[in-house]
Image (spheres, rainbow, N blue to C red):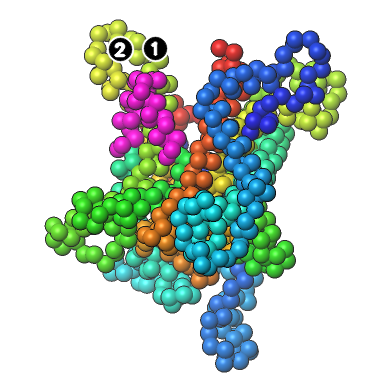
Amino acid sequence: MLTYTIRRLFTAIPTLIFISLIIFLLLDMAPGDPTASLPLTIPPEVREQIRQSLGMGEPVHIRYFLWLKQMVWSEPMFYLSQSVSWIDAPDAARLISWQTRAPVLDTVFERIPQTLMVVGLAYVVGVLIALPIGIISAYRQYSVFDQAGTFVSMIGFSIPPFFSGVLMIILFTVMMPNDSFWWFPSIYDTTLIVDSWENFGKQVRQMVLPVMVLALQTTAQISRFMRASMLDNLNQDYVRTARAKGMTESVVVLKHVLRNSMIPVITVIALGIPAIFGGAIITEQIFKVNGIGQLLIVSIQGSDVPMVQTLTFIFAVLIVLFNLIADILYGILDPRIRYD
Amino acid sequence: MTEAATPPSLDTRTEAPARNQWWDVWDQFKTHKGAVMGACFFIFIVLAVYVGPWIWSIDPTYIDIRARNQGSSFAHPFGTDQLGRDMLARMMAGGQTSISVGLTAMGLALFLGTLVGVLAGYFKRIDGLLMRTTDLFLALPLLPLLLVMVMLFRQPLSASFGPETGIFILIVIAIGITSWMPTARIVRGDVLALKEREFVLAARSIGTRPGRMILRHVLPNVMSPIMVSATLGIATAIITESALSFLGLGFPPDFPTWGRLLFDATDFMQQHPQRVMWPGLAISLTVLAVNYMGDGLRDALDPRIRGL
């Protein structure tokens, strides 16, 4: 198992380095100029000096290595030195956003809780709905329930989040009377502090719509996978053996079949986590959740290169990390995979 | 894509009742009700957006400020927007862009995917390199990168090709080079299996060159997975283009696409909710139809299911 994990780790690191190179080079071509927002009264030669001091005069590969060092060494060390007293802060300057003039990662860490709260909860809800649907659909294949499940997941695949979100707002915010229980706010209020039951209720209510939109997509995908995986297992010989031994149907399905079917589904669930962050970009925009997706859009519109670079890099790290987790999970759950 | 599923007539060499394989495919496709409905709806949408403007000849950019924010009427079946432009005409114009982007981007992705897949499957020497590249592309954060690409290249491209054509080229290329990977993987798998078959051995033993071998023997046999990816590719491309337009990073504001119309309508959601529905429904139904078509096509092209 250890060699398997190490082998997987060694494929993940070059991937990450290569992706960071692509992201860096792509953004390096950006027409934006870091000195563009400085006052026009600055003479050109001073402007050129400012550019030099920002490191713009160095060749590409040097700038790339400096950036990589900043991302994987200086910034983590800075946060480490803040939390642990025996590490000194590195003497490198922080990565500064062109737009807010604040350290990029501070802004990102301010935004991450909102994203995690909405996206994470939505994913959990989606998975919890999807698993029973998948199990029942497979067990009663071609029944009315299965047909309905297929249709609903087809809809979940086909309705993009930017329409389902708007549809939810129309149904639950615009058309619903304001005093109804089923009325939900369409704008996520981040300044709300949960300090009482009343505010907790408000927090839950404002999370309902974005969570529903994201959960619909998760449910559609995971329930299909669960169904297919259950169907693969239901016809296997060991199921017949289990039945022949006289086990009750619930033991056969929930103990024998379900455990074996969960192996590929768990890896799919792990692989879906970074994708849901990507989908959250749109959902956050619709419901005005100020998470990292919304931050990315704002930075793109403002040509804030360091911020965009960092955020894209974080998304890439998430993808590679969860690919790795899925691979290792698969190895743990299914010993056959380890010896390929 | 039913036009591809229907038999190309030049393939039937004899008048004898010997059946072409595409007739079998068509017979199987017909039994899938959802797929047939999806195909009919997709053809209807394509006709509506391309032929429709000749019948409904109102200019989508004509501003009639007195007739703004109207509901459905005989003069304007889908109503008018905040500047009094006819929504039906705008929907048709938007659909033309959305579907053209979808078809072109799908074509590009398919070309790249097939090229990489066939080369990787056929030539063992470059297999490892090409497949690692595919894995790398799969690990890229696609939506953020698409947004970044649009942000970076919008200005230079619109300067050299004009705002509309420039953005069209940019979006098609961006979607194309970020969505070829699944096709490449499927095609490579099929080519690897095909290479072990006897007819390939026979062709090689009479001295067929690799180029001719690929075009003549390999490509026709991997047509079915390519066609299935084609239908699914249209759906992804339409959704991606609409998502970009919805985030305000697609086509310029005065140039309607379905995503852009949806984005513009969300500002007036409270007063005129029906204006959101038209583009949203158009995107969702087109994608649903294409997905059902792909589902039926997959069944129809699978010889294990066909003929049962």
B74 vs A229, left or right, is right
Residue that appears at 39% across and 50% down = A167
Q: Residues within 10 Å of mark 1 (few under 14, many from 20)?
A: few
* Any part of residue B222 in sight: no
What is the x, y in percent for residue A187?
A: 32, 61
Residue that appears at 60% across and 58% down = B60
Q: Residue furthest left?
A: A197
Residue that appears at 53% across and 54% down = B76
Q: Secondary structure at mark 2?
A: helix
User: Is B252 inside the magenta-drawn segment?
Assistant: no
Earlier residue among tags 1 and 2: 1
- In this view, the residue in front, A89 or A256, is A256
Extent of the magenta region: A128-156
To which residue does mark 1 refer?
A: A237
**Main SS class of the magenta portion in the image:** helix
Disc 1 and disc 2 on one polypeptide chain: yes
| Kind of residue indicated by mark 1 | Asp
Quadrant of the rendered image containing residue B108: top right
- In this view, the residue in front, B225 or B277, is B277
What is the x, y in percent for residue A256?
A: 31, 20
Q: CA distance from mark 1 to mark 2?
A: 9 Å
From the viewer's perspective, is residue A66 above or below residue A174? below
User: Is A141 inside the magenta-drawn segment?
Assistant: yes
What is the x, y in percent for residue A246?
A: 25, 8
Q: Residues within 10 Å of mark 2 (few under 14, many from 20)?
A: some
| Kind of residue indicated by mark 2 | Ala
Q: Residue under mark 1: which chain is it in? A: A
Label disc, if present, on residue A242 of the rendered structure? 2
From the viewer's perspective, is residue A7 above or below residue B56? above
